[in-house]
Every structure is written in C-alpha cells, then in structure tokens.
Amino acid sequence: MRLSQAYMPTLREAPQDAEIVSHKLLLRAGMIRKTCSGVYTFLPLGYRVLRNIEEIVRRNMDEYGGQEIMMSVIQPAEIWQASGRWEKYGPEMFKVKDRNGRDFCLGPTAEEYFTTLVKDELTSYKQLPLNIYQIQLKYRDEKRPRFGLNRSREFLMKDAYTFDATPEGMEASYKNMEHCYDSIFNEIGLEYVKVDSDSGQMGGNMTIEYQALADTGEGALFYTDNYKFAATDEKCEVVYEVKNKDDAMKEKEAVKTPNCKTIEDVANFLGKDKSECVKAIALKARDEKFFVFIPGDRELNMTKFVNYAGVNDYDVEMMDDETILASGSVPGFMGPFNLEGRVILDKRLTEMKNMVVGANEVDAHFVNVNYKRDFDGEIAGDLLMAQVGDMAPDGSGELKMRRGIEVGQIFGLGTKYSESLGAGFLDENGVKKPFWMGSYGVGISRTITAIIEQNYDEFGIIWPINIAPYEVIITVVNTADEAQVKVAEDLYKELSRDFTVLIDDRKERAGVKFNDRDLIGIPLRITVGKGVLEDKVEFSLRKTPKDREDIKTEEVLNRLLEERRILCQ
Ligand code: ATP
Ligand code: MG
C-alpha cells in the first residue's frame, strides 16, 4: 500500500476523552474513530489488525474442531424470556421493537440462540459432540463505556458453544477449548494469566477467565507466586482469621460515641482495633432491603453479596438515609437488632467475640456484643473482598495483586440453557436427555487494546509481527530524488511478493514520515536515503528504533526474511 494514497489520518494529539495508552494510540495512529459513546469504526490499518487477530482465532478454533457459522445480530425476545435472561440481563441489553411491536434484542451473547438453532436438528447422541462458533458483533449497553475498544457498546467477539451427551463429555469439550484458548493467546503473544472467576448471569461454576496483564486493566487479580493460585477480586475466597474467637463473652454494654460515624472514628474513640468492630452496609434492590454486617477492617465484596442475596447486580444500590431511618436504624450507627429488612452476616461474625456494633441510635454503640446471645441473622458465608497479604485459599502463599484486561472466558454451563429451552437428544435407549453445554468467548476487538497496553513506547505502538497491519514499511527520505524513488519502488515490488508492505512515498518532510512510522508500529523498517549512491539502505526494527544498520540493497529481502523468522519465534 502507498501511503500517498492511504486513508491513515494520524493525529499529533489524542482527543481529550481518551484515557489510556491503547485508546490514545489507536486514535492517533488513525486506526479507529469514534462514532458515538462506546461505538467505533475501524479505519484501514485498524481493520487489518482486527482481521489478523480474527484469523488467529479462526484458525485455532478450526484446528480444535470448531465449525464456523454466522448468526443474525437480531434475536427474538422469546428465547431470552424462556431462559429468564430477558430480565436478568438488565439494562445492558439493547432492546428493539419491530413495526408490529414485537420485542427483539441486539445479541449481547448467544447461548439461547445457539441452543434454539440446534434444538430440532441435533436429535441423536450419534451427532454429539458438536462445537460451533461465530465471529460477530455483539451489543451491550454498558453502564460506563470507556477506554475505547476495551469497554465498548458494540464489539467483535468470537463466541463458541459445545453440545455433549454427558457431563464427562462437556468436561472434555471444555478442556479442549481451554487448550485452544491457550494456543490463541500464546500465538497472539500476550502475557496473560488464567484465573478462577465468577460466572455472573451465565450460570454454572466451571469457568476460567483469560486476563492479559496490564496496569490499566479494569480487573484486579489476586495470585500467589508462579500463579499457583489466581482468582479475580470478585471471586477470590477470603481466608480471614478471627483473632479473639476463643475469648470469653463479656457483658453487653451501651456506650456513647458522639460523632463517631466511621469505623475508624469508633475504633479510635473506644481504643479498639477495627477488627473488633462490625461494619454495616445498608443496601436495597428494588423493594428488598438488606443490612449486611462484616468485620470492621474489611470491605464488602459486592459480587459475593449479589450471588448470595439472589438479586440482579444492576438493581443494587446503597440505601438512602430516609429508608435507613424508616427501617429502624440510623446512618452511621447501624446494628443487627430489630431491623426491617434482611440481616445478612459474613460468617466471621459467628466467631468474633465481644464486638462493637451500632445501637441504631444517634451517637451510640454497644460493646461486648456476641452472635446468638445478642443478635441473629442469615449467615452468608464469605462476603469479603480479598486484600494483598491474605493467605491464599489453597494455602499456596500470601496473596499479591495485579491488574488485568479480560480477553476471554470459557464456561462449562451444564444443562441450564438446554433444559429451559427444551433442547435435547435421544440417548442409546431412546430416552430424551438435555445437552451438556459449554460456552466460550474471545473479545477480539478488546484484545487489540491488551496487545497495545503490553507493546508500546513513547513514540507509538510496537505491533507483534503477526498482528501488525503491515510487516514492512519502506520510507523514501526524499521523494524529489529520483535515485531514491527508483530503489524504493524496486524494493516495494520485490518485497511485496513475500511480505505485506507499506511504502511511504508521501511528499512530506522525512521527520513527519519517521514519526508516523513509529506511531503506527510497523515491525520491519527500510529507510531509503542518500545511501543509495553506495547501493545501501538502512534497516531497523520498530522495537529497537535506535539500532540502525546500513545494508546492501541486494541483501534486503534475505535480511527481512531472517528478521521475520526471528520475530515469529
Ligand atoms: P466484563 O466482565 O469485562 O464486562 P464479561 O465477563 O461480561 O466482560 P463475557 O460475557 O465473558 O464478558 O464475554 C466474552 C468476552 O467478550 C470477554 O472476555 C471480553 O473479552 C469481551 N467483552 C465483553 N464485554 C465487552 C465490551 N463491553 N467491550 C469489548 N469487549 C467486551
Ligand atoms: Mg467474562
């Protein structure tokens, strides 16, 4: 491709609303443009990158037994109503009506649709297992679209679904897809971690998230050395030792705690440790009210709460002061006594002794409060957020934390969708059974952001060669110099037989061309300048831009073939 004719609108500055490096660089390099909040158009270079990733995913999926189909984006409401997700998916789902008032959605994922598709056509155990997938735009009306392609409202996803006759079959299909995903992300060259995670509204509890490590990632990962243990913050089970569990119960006592509204205030005022106090969090979800109590030195894990309470995450909000007052308590002084609403306890409260809790009265707490003797409630198990330094639940060491970008997730779904949609097969004995299913997603457009977050410098993007929009760029230093143009054009012709090549033949200053070349991140570079008088051109790699080497023009092809071989290793 000739840059003199290319649609590559590079920018010197990124627009104000671009927050993270990948978003800024994609805009500056002329790879994407914003259509509206969370919706993007891919320009020629960006689209080539997207297609390269798509091809890696497709080739691996085919190798591991997947068959590609393409579904419609529009999906009828009925199948979502049958699984219960028409409501459960919440405001993230883009819903549309046709002219007759019938409901549809723009697919955010497609478990229901794939299940419905095979329902009447996959009828015998002899046709199983089956692995089908698509690479398709998905739509989610994210609450907070941000970071460009990272959390967008329209994005490209590869979604695959497996159908098996038995749970063992499902496990084998799931393992096969795990190997496929390992292969995909290794080939893309990402530094990633496989983590245990929450399965959200998807269902089932067999799941792995693929997290590309990046400080700008939205997800927090807790792990131990060599990732022996790794889980998302949402999922990570918390090991929390109650220090005073063997203490004798003391007599409950009311104390005045003027203006002590936070745990810190109360602990300081009473000369106690925060771990001896109880933290109260008042929440509501639609008409239901919840008073949640946890150890005072920890934070509530909202995902664990949502899973326990059985509410929709998008319905949960903090309880306002009026509602707290109307429910028998006082903001800042909440205690688990005589409340109107569900009282939910982290399991450690059953062990803690002589706790400090709110008295549901202004400026008042109780000390030496003990579970069962003084209060009761639903025991929800573990409701805590993990923190660095906790012992890992598998005992493999103390937890550390890093941030990641979720690029893929695989799920063993069981029979949730096949049962709710009445999809099954006849076994050897002619008995109808539901399919054992799995579902597997790769965020293809989001993966672009993860690659950039791991591969850039102060000058721009550094594409891995198998992802780069072009492998080679030839820069003509002075387009008014006929000798330079001739050498560059000849090389362009020659190299194009073995490589994807860009030639910068624009009538621009050399500096502009060098800046653009760095910005768009083409891995192999040839600069054609004054050296042509001695039959020489300059070679450099994008990842080490300062190491420049003059080489014989006739050696360029072999040198580039060799350099590509090294980069592909
Ligand atoms: P997240 O937790 O980040 O919202 P998710 O767990 O809801 O993602 P999945 O349903 O597992 O996402 O979708 C499969 C893949 O699609 C994800 O692993 C991710 O890479 C990608 N993806 C999900 N939501 C978005 C989005 N809003 N923008 C871009 N990619 C996305
Ligand atoms: Mg996910």
Image: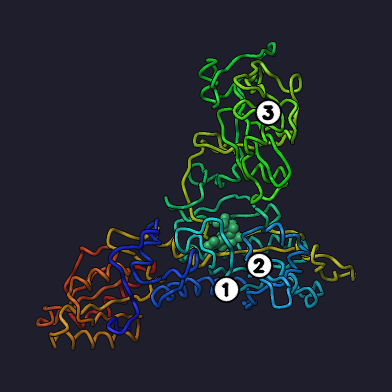
Q: Is residue 401 above or below residue 13?
A: above
Instruction: Check disc 3 and report its element: helix, strand or loop.
Output: loop
Q: Determine whether, in the image, residue 507 is placed left or right of residue 464.
A: left
Picture mark count: 3
Q: Would residue 46 be visible to someone looking at this image?
A: yes
Sequence-wise first label, 1 or 3: 1
Q: If the picture is divided into quarters, which one holds ligand 1?
A: bottom right
Q: Determine whether, in the image, residue 515 is placed left or right of residue 461.
A: left
- The location of residue 320, given as percent across then percent down, is 62, 38
Pointer 2: residues within 10 angstroms few (<14), some, or many (20+)?
some
Q: CB under 8 Å between callouts 3 and 2? A: no
Q: Amino acid at mark 2?
A: Lys
Q: In which quadrant is the C terminus drawn? A: bottom left
Distance from label 3 to label 2 (Cα)? Answer: 40 Å
- The location of residue 533, given as percent across then percent down, is 9, 82
Instruction: Check disc 2 and report its element: helix, strand or loop.
Output: strand
Q: Label 1 belongs to which residue? A: 135
- The location of residue 122, given as percent across then percent down, is 78, 75
Distance from label 1 to label 3 (Cα)? Answer: 52 Å
Sequence-wise first label, 3 or 2: 2
State the image quarter where residue 470 is shown: bottom left
The extreme top residue here reads: 251
The image's mark for residue 329 is: 3
Q: CB under 8 Å between callouts 1 and 2? A: no
Camera-nearest label, 1 or 3: 3
Sequence-wise first label, 1 or 2: 2
The image's mark for residue 95 is: 2
Q: Would residue 551 be visible to someone looking at this image?
A: no
The extreme left residue here reads: 533
Camera-nearest label, 1 or 2: 2
Going 57% across and 24% down the picture, which residue do you hit? 275
Q: Amino acid at mark 3?
A: Ser
